[in-house]
Amino acid sequence: MASLKSLAKDTAIYGLSSIVGRFLNYLLVPLYTAKLSAESGGYGVITNVYAYTALILVILTYGMETTLFRYSNKDGENADTVFSTALKSVSFTSLTFIALVLVFISPLSAIMGYAEHPAYIWTMAVTVAVDAVHCILFARLRYEKRPVKFAALKLFFIILNISLNIFFFVVVPEFTDRSTDVGYAFYINLACSMIVTFCFAKEIKTALGVKFDGALLRRMLSYGWPILVLGIAGILNQTADKILFPYIYDAGNANEQLGIYGAASKIAMIMAMITQAFRYAYEPFVFGKAKDKDGDSREVYAKAMKYFIIFTLMAFLLVSGYMGILRHIIGRDYWSGLRVVPVVMVAEIMMGIYFNLSFWYKLIDKTIWGAWFSGIGCAVLVATNIIFVPVYGYMACAWAGVAGYGVAMTLSYLVGQRHYPIRYPLGEIAFYVLLAAALFAGITVSNDKLPLAAAIGTNTLLVALFAFVVVKRDFPLSSLPVVGKYFRDKK
């Protein structure tokens, strides 16, 4: 139980930076959707370009984050050497990537549909290369269990980014040419990434002071390449729709529709916040737990899965219940896309469960399984997009995510129970899923039939009912700090 408390504490710190950071980042959504109308397609450009960068970031890190945790915790390996080797390798490949983009910038921009704006492409190429190096540096902080510095740097980047965006778009808008507003978003992102690099001076100095180990790198690459395939497939599950949409949606307003879908999906990203916070804490926790060789490790993993699902379901109900308020995050002419929000949140929950399930093959060094699962899930997602987007538009993108993650999640569970069986409390999990589904149905009716104030009041009661059941069954008040003493004394 102490292990779970430690996991919860780290998740809370990572979650604070993630949730607060994402919330602050949401300030950019109303800013961009106010400055760039849906009809202009400007936000569609931002959505499309950032989808490419998310994919490239996975390629440029090629599984080194997870590999760093695995080898830093391996007997006989020196953690500093592992870190130094990973950082130098990723830095070299990132610099090579920048050089290639600059050499082929003209044809590359034309293929991506930005022949008139090559600066968009090279700016984001440099940014994603710098971010790839940051991934290894942030992973080092996670390995060293330094969530405070991790959170501080993440928040510093976000606050700096928002401040510069507000400055250029609101305070001194005369500096921004209306034809290049989208470009300013990319230039600001690059500047912020470069500034944050200087905050890692201590970690970079440590890496430079340790010799690069080529033999170690070969072992790490052997372990990590299936994770790269897994990561590519995984990120494609999140971004393929946004990359493919301009090519397969033939109604003539692809950027407008993509912008609406991208803006509305931002509201669903509360799931991504929770999943990301959990991942930051859970990955080093699992590998450290495996190194300790505790007899109760599998039981702890099973409980962690249940609690993860409970809290994501709670978040799902909260977002759905307060949609009448949250919709104001985006401009009014983007509201037509709000129907995708529950579907995208379901896909994010499935992605989180899939991530949670993925540790069985990482712990037994059979990461090839992850490549197969994610690859199959990605194929399902891409096929669903190609077949249905021309007919149903961006709603098909949302359901394609559910299909892709659902397939990958199911395969990982079924195969994992044969190779690394964990007794997950399926009955308890099913109970909470069914309860959340019933309450969501009530919330949907409330949102459709009642005035806003009445709907908010009704939905609050429905969410409170879910919370009451959770506390009654799994989080008795007597077990809580401070207030728990009162309830224990009453007994």
Image: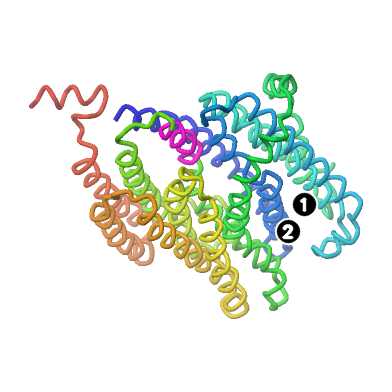
Q: Is residue 151 visible?
A: no
Q: Is residue 314 visible?
A: yes
Say whether residue 472 is left or right of residue 210: left
Quarter of the rendering occupied by the N terminus:
top left
Residue 17 place in picture, x, y as percent: 53, 33
Magenta stretch bounds? 277-290
Q: Residue at x 84, y 55 (%)?
A: 179
Residue 30 disc label: none
SS state under label 2: helix
Question: Which residue is pictured at 70% across the width and 24% down the height?
Answer: 207
Q: Quadrant of residue 395?
A: bottom right
* Label 1: element kind: helix
The residue wearing badge 2 is 45
Q: Residue 169 in the image: x percent, y percent?
A: 75, 43
Q: Of 180 and 110, which appears nearest the observer?
A: 110
At horizontal 22% and vertical 29% (from top left) the residue drawn is 479
Question: Residue 284 lies in magenta, yes or no?
Answer: yes
Q: Residue under circle 1?
A: 182
Report how many numbered discs are placed on residues in the image: 2
Q: CB atoms at circles 2 and 1 under 8 Å apart?
A: yes
Identified by mark 2, the residue type is Val
Mark 2 vs mark 1, CA separation in Å: 8 Å
- 422 or 355, which is in the foreground? 422
